[in-house]
Image (spheres, rainbow, N blue to C red):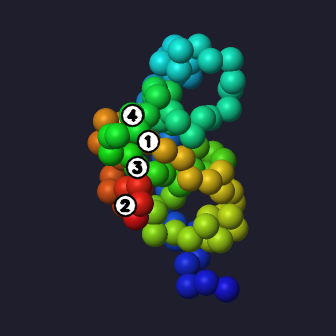
């Protein structure tokens, strides 16, 4: 049992940060056929990530909302929205995401 009650966790709604329509993401991806997310693309916009640019990670629920980064994987897994894992976000899109919901690569 952890000290964090899942009902106390405030997720960042996808309506705040995930603003690029699916169709536009497909265009940004270069119309790749895969519908799954790639580790080399930003989940906000679908654009390829620049390997030399600053990168952020966000913790995604199955509802598309973001967990605060200080929530452990175990707590997110036990949350009703579930735990889809950590996904990369490019520096530009990361500007839309409050600091408590994004983690810099390597931190
Ligand atoms: Zn992006």
Q: Is mark 4 within 8 Å of ligand 1?
A: no
Image quarter (top left, top right, bottom left or bottom right) of the C terminus? bottom left
> Quick check: 54 above or below 92?
below
At 67% from the left edge and 86% from the top edge, which residue is drawn? 1
Q: Is residue 74 left or right of residue 47?
A: right
Query: Which residue corresponds to mark 3?
Result: 56
Q: Is residue 45 left or right of residue 82?
A: left
Q: Secondary structure at mark 2?
A: helix
Residue 50 disc label:
4
Query: First in sequence: mark 2 or mark 3?
Result: 3
Residues tagged 1 and 3 counted as in contact (Cβ below 8 A): yes
| Cα distance between the residues tagged 4 and 3 | 12 Å
Q: CB at mark 1 closer than 8 A to ligand 1? A: yes
Q: CA distance from mark 1 to mark 2?
A: 14 Å
Could you say which is closer to the camera, residue 14 or residue 99? Answer: 99
- Select label 4 or label 3 by which is in front: 4
- From the image, tell me which residue sits under label 2: 100
Circle nearer the N terminus (1, 3):
3
Q: Which residue is mark 1?
A: 89
Q: CA distance from mark 2 to mark 3?
A: 12 Å
Nearest the eye: 73 or 6: 73
| Relative image position of residue 89 (x, y in whole percent) | 44, 42
Number of numbered callouts drawn? 4
């Amino acid at each position: 049992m952890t000290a964090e009650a899942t009902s106390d966790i405030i997720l960042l709604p996808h309506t705040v940060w995930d603003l690029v329509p699916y169709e536009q993401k497909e265009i940004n991806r270069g119309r790749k056929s895969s519908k799954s997310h790639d580790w080399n693309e930003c989940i906000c916009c679908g654009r390829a990530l620049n390997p030399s640019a600053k990168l952020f990670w966000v913790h995604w629920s199955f509802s598309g909302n973001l967990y605060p980064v200080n929530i452990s994987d175990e707590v997110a897994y036990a949350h009703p929205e579930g735990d889809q894992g950590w996904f990369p976000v490019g520096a530009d899109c990361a500007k839309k995401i409050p600091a408590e919901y994004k983690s810099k690569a390597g931190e």
